[in-house]
Image: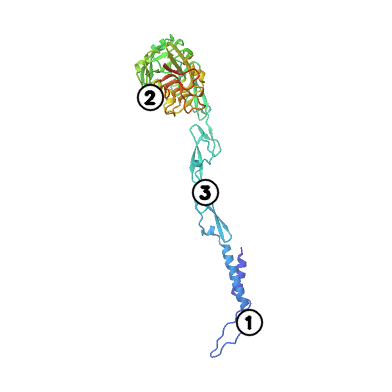
Amino acid sequence: MADMTTLIVISSFIMFPAVMMAQEVVNHGVCPVPMNKEEEEIIKEQERNREEMEEIMREIEISCLDECKTGQHNCHDDAYCTNTKRSFTCTCKPGYTGDGVNCADIKECETGNNQCDPDTSVCDNTKGSYKCVCKSGFSKSGHEHKCTDINECETGKHNCNATSSLCQNTKGSFKCVCREGYSRSGPEQNCTDKCTVSIKLDATTLNRQRKRENKAYLLNVESKQIPVYCQMEAAELGACGGGGWTLVMKIDGKQNTFHYISKLWTNRKDHNPSAGKTPLDHQETKLPTYWSTPFTKICLAMKIGHQVNSIVINKQANSLHSLISDRYYRSTSLGRHTWKKLIGQQASLQRNCNREGFNSGWWLRSHSKARIGIVSNEQNDCNSPDSRIGFGTGGLYYTDNTCGNVAFHQPDNGYRNIKAMCYILVQ
C-alpha cells in the first residue's frame, strides 16, 4: 500500500509533467502553426503516461480502503470483519454458526455440545454461549462448567439431630442415619426412640409394646389417631421376623379390589380401614400408612391355606405410595428363587426374563404384570411374560388372580393359578 509521500510524488507527476503540452494560440486571422512529428510523439507519450498513472492511483485508492473500519461491509452483528486487498471477509463469532453475513446462535444446551454434567447441573443457553447452573446440593468448583457436591455434614447445612442420628453425606444431599436405639419417624429426617412404626404412640400403646403384643395401636398419622395393626412377634410372619411391623395392606387374590389397574395403587384414599385393626385374616384393607409411613424394610407375606410364607425387601423410601404411584419400574435383586418362597413347593415360573421389583411389566397391555413382584417368560426377553408371583397382579393368564402365582407356557413346575391371601407390612 502506498504511503503519503508516494501519493504526493505521483500526484505531482500527473499535475506537472516534465514536458508541458503546447497550448493552442489563435491569433486574429492567423491559423496556428502545425506541430511537427517530434512534438506529436512527445504529446502521445505524455498521454500514455497520464493514463497509466491514473490507473495506478485508482488501484492505490482501492487498496487503501478498509471496509471494516469505514463500515462499508455487510457482516452480521455477531461476526468478525477482516480487511483484505480490494475486499473483506466475514466470520461468525464463537458460539454462532453461519457464513458471516448471516449468523445464528448455536443452542449448546439443545445440541448437547456443552460441558455441563446432567447429574450436577442444568445447562442454560445464553447468546453466543451457555452456562451450567448447579443443582441443589452442588456448587461451582472453580471451573466455569463444573459443579461439585456440597458436603452438608461438614458444613453443618443439615437438620440431623446429633443425639439421635448421624449425618451421612450423599451426592447432592444428605441423610440422617438413626443411632442405635432410635428409628425413623418421618420423611423430615427425625429419629425417635425405637417403637412400632417410628410414629408417636400414646402411653397405653407403649406399655403394650413392651409386652411385645400383636395389637392394633393408636398411631398419629396425618394429625389424626387411627388404629393400625402392628405385628410384634416373629412367629406368624416367618422369615420377616418380629421387631414391630406396621400393616399397610391386606389383599385377597380372589378379589379384583387390588388388581394391577386399580386406582388404589396410585391414589391417597384408604379402603375398608376398620379391617386394618385386625390380624392377618381374610379382610381386605388399605391404610393411610400406604402413603404416610417411611421405612427401610418391606415384609411381603402370602397365606395359602393355613401356611404363611414371607420374604423381606430391604428398601428405604418415604412411603410405599412413592415407589408405585408414578408407575415407573423400580428393580429389586432378590432373585427368582426368593420370590418362589412366597408360594412354597408349588411355585412355578417360566425360566427367562425374571423382571422383578415395583411396577414390573407395566408397559404390557395384556401380559403378566405386578405392582410388587416378578414376571417371567419362556422366550429370552421380557416382551410377553406369561407367569408371575406378586402383589397387585393382572394380565395373561388368569386376569382375575390379583395376588399369588400364575404360570403358563412352559413354566418350570407346571401350570399354576394359585390365589393367595396377601399381606404387606413395613418397618
* Residue 274 appears left or right of 140: left
User: Do the CB atoms of the residues marked 3 and 2 lie less than 8 Å apart?
Assistant: no
On the image, which quarter does residue 424 sit in?
Answer: top left
The residue tagged 3 is 97
Nearest to viewer (mark 1 / mark 2)? 2
Residue 183: horizontal and vertical position, in percent?
Answer: 47, 18
Vertical placement of residue 279 versus 262, above or below = above
- Give the SS element for disc 2: loop
Q: Name which of mark 1 and mark 2 comes first in the sequence.
A: 1
Q: CA distance from mark 1 to mark 3?
A: 65 Å
The residue tagged 2 is 262
Q: CA distance from mark 1 to mark 2?
A: 117 Å
Q: In the image, what residue type sits under mark 2?
A: Ser
* Nearer to me, 201 or 80: 80
* Nearer to me, 144 or 97: 97
On the image, which quarter does residue 258 sit in?
Answer: top left
Vertical placement of residue 85 versus 122, above or below = below
Q: Is residue 282 visible?
A: yes
The residue tagged 1 is 39
- Give the SS element for disc 1: helix
On the image, which quarter does residue 365 sit in?
Answer: top left
Disc 2 crowd rating (10 Å Cα; few below 14, some 14-19, many 20+) is few
Rendered image coloring scheme: rainbow
Residue 122: horizontal and vertical position, in percent?
Answer: 49, 37
Nearest to viewer (mark 1 / mark 3)? 3
Q: In the image, what residue type sits under mark 3?
A: Thr
* Residue 325 appears left or right of 146: left
